[in-house]
């Protein structure tokens, strides 16, 4: 989504420093949802949020199986 070199990203810095805007947040949430089978809201992407915190949230959602329609239906 950012189209930047991975080595240039500080995972502990605020995402606002990376230039992530609301459109990028929506795109990231959609990609994560599709590729990881989770539901993450773009509204969770506040300017002071870090990529480290995003990663922790995504890991928690995966571990809980949250957002998996087939899992939820069972």
Image (cartoon, rainbow, N blue to C red):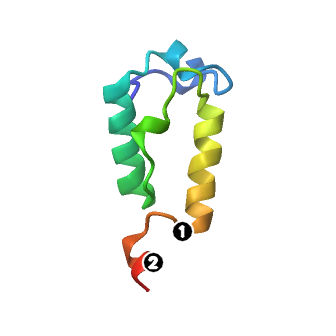
Calculate the distance from the C-alpha at mark 2 to the C-alpha at mark 1. Answer: 7 Å
Q: Which mark is residue 56?
A: none
x, y (%) of residue 34? 35, 55
Q: Regarding mark 1 in the picture, which secondary structure is present there? A: loop
Position of the N terminus, as image quadrant, is top left
x, y (%) of residue 19? 44, 15
Q: Are the residues at dot 2 and dot 1 in contact (C-beta closer than 8 Å)?
A: yes
Category of crowding for the residue at label 2, using alpha-carbon neighbours closer than 10 angstroms: few (below 14), some (14–19), many (at least 20): few
Outermost residue on the bottom side: it is: 74
Q: Can you identify the residue that label 1 sits on?
A: 65
Task: Identify which residue is drawn at 54% across, 26% down.
Answer: 6
Place residue 29 in its image quadrant: top left
Q: Is residue 41 left or right of residue 14?
A: left
Of residues 3 and 49, the one drawn nearer to the viewer in this rendering: 49
Category of crowding for the residue at label 1, using alpha-carbon neighbours closer than 10 angstroms: few (below 14), some (14–19), many (at least 20): some
Task: Identify which residue is drawn at 42% across, 48% down.
Answer: 32
Task: Identify which residue is drawn at 41% across, 38% down.
Answer: 42
Task: Identify which residue is drawn at 56% across, 58% down.
Answer: 61
x, y (%) of residue 18? 50, 17
Position of the C terminus, as image quadrant, is bottom left
Q: Can you identify the residue that label 2 sits on?
A: 71
Number of labels in the image equals: 2
Q: Is residue 51 above or below residue 38?
A: above
Q: Which one is earlier in the sequence, the residue at label 2 or at label 1?
A: 1
Q: Is residue 40 left or right of residue 55?
A: left
Q: Is residue 7 above or below residue 55?
A: above
Q: Regarding mark 2 in the picture, which secondary structure is present there? A: helix
């Amino acid at each position: 989504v950012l189209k930047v070199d991975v080595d240039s990203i500080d995972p502990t810095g605020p995402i606002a420093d990376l230039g992530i805007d609301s459109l990028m947040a929506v795109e990231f949430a959609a990609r994560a949802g599709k590729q990881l089978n989770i539901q993450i809201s773009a509204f969770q992407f506040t300017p002071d949020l870090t990529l480290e915190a995003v990663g922790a949230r995504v890991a928690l959602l995966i571990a809980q199986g949250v957002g998996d329609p087939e899992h939820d239906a069972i």
